[in-house]
Image (spheres, coloured by chain):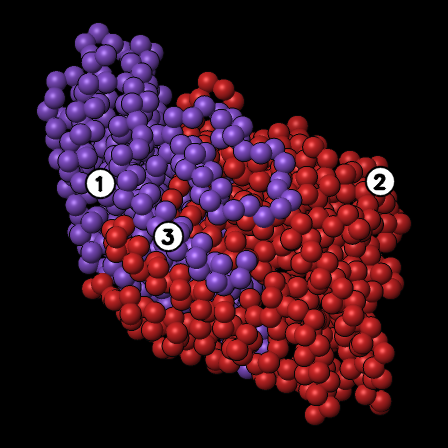
Chain colours: A red, B purple
Amino acid sequence: MGPEEFRQAAHRLVDWVADYRASVASLPVRSQVAPGEVAGALPPCPPEEPGSLEAFIDDLDQVIVPGLTHTQHPRNFAWFPSNASLASVLGDLVAAGIGALGISWQSAPALTELEQVVCDWARQLCGLSPAWHGTIYDGASTACLVALLVARERALAGSAGSQREAGLQAAASPLVVYTSPEAHSSVPKAALLAGFGASNLRFVPVRRPSRAMDARALGELMAEDAASSRRPAAVVATAGTTSTTAFDPISEICEVASRYGAFVHVDAAMAGSAMLLPECRDLFFGIEQADSISWNPHKWLGSVLETSLFYLKDPAALVSVMATNPSYLRSFSEEPVVEYRDWGLPLGRRFRALRLWALLRLEGAEALRARMRRDLANAERLAKLVASEPGWEVLAPVRLQTVCVRHSPAGLAGEELDRHTLAWCEAVNSSGRAHVTPAQLDGRWMVRVSVGAETTEWADVEALWEIMRQAAKL
Amino acid sequence: MGPEEFRQAAHRLVDWVADYRASVASLPVRSQVAPGEVAGALPPCPPEEPGSLEAFIDDLDQVIVPGLTHTQHPRNFAWFPSNASLASVLGDLVAAGIGALGISWQSAPALTELEQVVCDWARQLCGLSPAWHGTIYDGASTACLVALLVARERALAGSAGSQREAGLQAAASPLVVYTSPEAHSSVPKAALLAGFGASNLRFVPVRRPSRAMDARALGELMAEDAASSRRPAAVVATAGTTSTTAFDPISEICEVASRYGAFVHVDAAMAGSAMLLPECRDLFFGIEQADSISWNPHKWLGSVLETSLFYLKDPAALVSVMATNPSYLRSFSEEPVVEYRDWGLPLGRRFRALRLWALLRLEGAEALRARMRRDLANAERLAKLVASEPGWEVLAPVRLQTVCVRHSPAGLAGEELDRHTLAWCEAVNSSGRAHVTPAQLDGRWMVRVSVGAETTEWADVEALWEIMRQAAKL
């Protein structure tokens, strides 16, 4: 396809996207298709001949859109917000159009340097000190894995267990990783993939009702492990857990970890955006003492996926774990340059920084803050309505924009209550009028209302509340 | 930004992209900026207020484009092709515009099912049997890491070293990984990150002049390791090495590996596209015997980055290593569904399949094959010219579209020859008229001419050859 054919087709698709966004509120939020329906509607064999743009758009309309749960819908309260702000879509379009290849500084200097600039802009907006150096990953799962690999190598440095020697399989004493049972599933996954093993992963108890990690219990566990010739290697603290947006006490955790030289990674995947709001920064108290932080501008803030920021204080430690320098990848520059391939798992990257740059440039920080403040206020207002309604309860402190709710009719408990919860949640979702997702809290189902889609206004939250109450009555 | 403002801005940027592609041949291929120049041209602090589209486009023109090495330039012969075909850009635009969130089947059924369909289309185009199941990763580095993690857990299954138990740090006998010294730098990187340790990574010698792994030497190394109570766990074979596009003998390697139950991963990152050409499939002889394969449609084939296919025969083994099932991520479906979060490292993904789907739908397979055949013919034609020119040599068999060359004036050898090679290579690149990248072969520099940018015609290759000869005369 040449540039002129692209021009025509892309204009058509820009209109298609604009129309989609303009009308998304009229679609059922959660896709109503059954498993296999989308795949079954597509040809089982690949096309030999070129297809028309018309047929492509027909497939988008007839097959793809009905198969979507509409993340950008104003009544999408499921999981966490994943806003693909249209300003960011513009940056992503330019990135794909340019088609730059990020495998070394030389392969696309602007790709590397814009990433440096944008990561530093985001750092400043978060109120983080200049001690932090950032890069963009695909997601927070990757960030956690990388953090634990760096922690692992820090603990093994100079020993036979170093990856430069015989590797973890030759570690002298078991390394231990700590997190809370409220941590995201990507944390145990990362610990296992990094080779620590499930039996060397400690789930530190949380306090109630905050559901924040109990730093004193962490200290006790670490002391026990150290006394048994195990080595506390890393703690993953969460700023804004997935179930209830609980905040672990970062300062206290760092103080405990420092006694054992353990690495502290802060997973702020969702809540990191709240660092843009000075009034929310107390929640992150102590973050400057941590070793690494991840947060995803592709969630609440509005950057197109996959834009996950990873900050750390000691990039040299990261580079020492990740660096490769084959002859075919050298940047022939007389001055030192940053080679982002040595800052993470993948070699090549697309022009990731453009989507965050476009968002910040075209929207400006103040508009992003205003939108997030709107969401905080809407969540608080909803929580008040729920708490004041007989039979309904708010199950966890509302720290940000997520409200955890349950409807408990008199006499219902245990599995019966679970069935009721899942039933009314499913009734909301199958209606297509709004989308919320359930989660378990202490083994019992609840429903999370995660306010924060870019287009969600109070009227949408109010509508959801009405839909929920109707559903719970059935 | 609302849909109408987006519509206007996106139309402007579509024209910008089309104009960029239409005029890219007139730009210097390699960016002429010095380190820090791009970053220095951008404001050090983030914008508080919204910026205009005009100013954004000005920055693209004045700062970003001069800071780019133009991957889509017809005289770009550097590294390997990384074609962002405009048909694929259309798919990517739709993906960003829709803003779907892929964290479970339920979160975007079409995202999951289109990925299944497109991976299967690509499988069929490659002539691979239905035994293979595919997914899309960001790149082949990730694929290699995943393959080695699966191999590690296969070797440790049921033992204390399993990640579900005490992890690799409790492995009873050292696990060993094998690859060739010609393997991509991501292979040793993956082996180290997976915890095997550098001293448990064997570089199996290659044969000459093919530079393909010597399967007999592999067998000897494995036998030695097994006799010393080490456990051969995995082999990474390369189909199309980075330096010279050498092909390891997959069938022989699989035969040797099977004696020890070792996992075989085939890294066909670049060359995988050639599987679309039946006349090239002999190069992959034995691939059906391997355990996993990765290849990147984002290289020669033309999909926008980051589109890397990972195929494996036993998805259950992969899922057992990667699976998480937290309450907040369940798909409430009565029928079984594929959860791609359990097929790799990240949890969330954007609508990756759309860019490959758009490429295949809008171009059709036959056009892609024709383009690659053009490139193969151009590379062969160039190799003949080089080989017949006094003072010039082709250093490795031309298996695909990459020609490894050196100019050796009488009397020059050793470091003097290296200096000459790097000097004329730099002269080509600093001229801006073409871009080639050097690499070391047996410790001495050569220049790789990697034909295959989507817009590269014979006239461009011919022009490069003239530019190279001029540069070497200086």
| Residue B454 horizontal/vertical position (percent) | 25, 45
**Is label 2 in a helix, a strand or a loop?**
helix
Q: Given this view, does label 3 or label 2 mark the residue nearer the observer?
A: 3
* Residue drawn at 85 percent across, 84 percent down: A390
Where residue B14 is drawn, which disc sits there?
3
Closer to us: mark 1 or mark 3? Answer: 3
Please give the label number shown on residue A255: 2
- Amino acid type of the residue that numbered disc 1 sits on in the rendered structure: Thr
Q: Going 62% across and 73% down the picture, which residue do you hit? A: A75
Residue located beneath label 1 in the image: B456
Picture coordinates of residue B224, whole percent (x, y):
45, 37
Amino acid on which disc 3 is placed: Val
Q: Residue at x 77, y 78 (%)?
A: A406
User: Is circle 1 on the same chain as circle 3?
Assistant: yes
**Residue closer to the observer: B213 or B54:** B54
Q: Quadrant of residue A170?
A: top right
Q: Position of residue A60 (x, y in %)?
A: 38, 70
Q: Residue furthest bottom?
A: A474
State the residue lying farthest toward the left. Answer: B388
Q: In which chain is the residue bearing label 3? A: B
In space, the residues marked 1 and 3 are separated at their CA atoms by: 23 Å
Eyeballing the image, is B116 above or below A165?
below
Quarter where residue B237 is shown: top left
Protein chain holding label 2: A
User: Hey, what amino acid is under mark 2?
Assistant: Glu
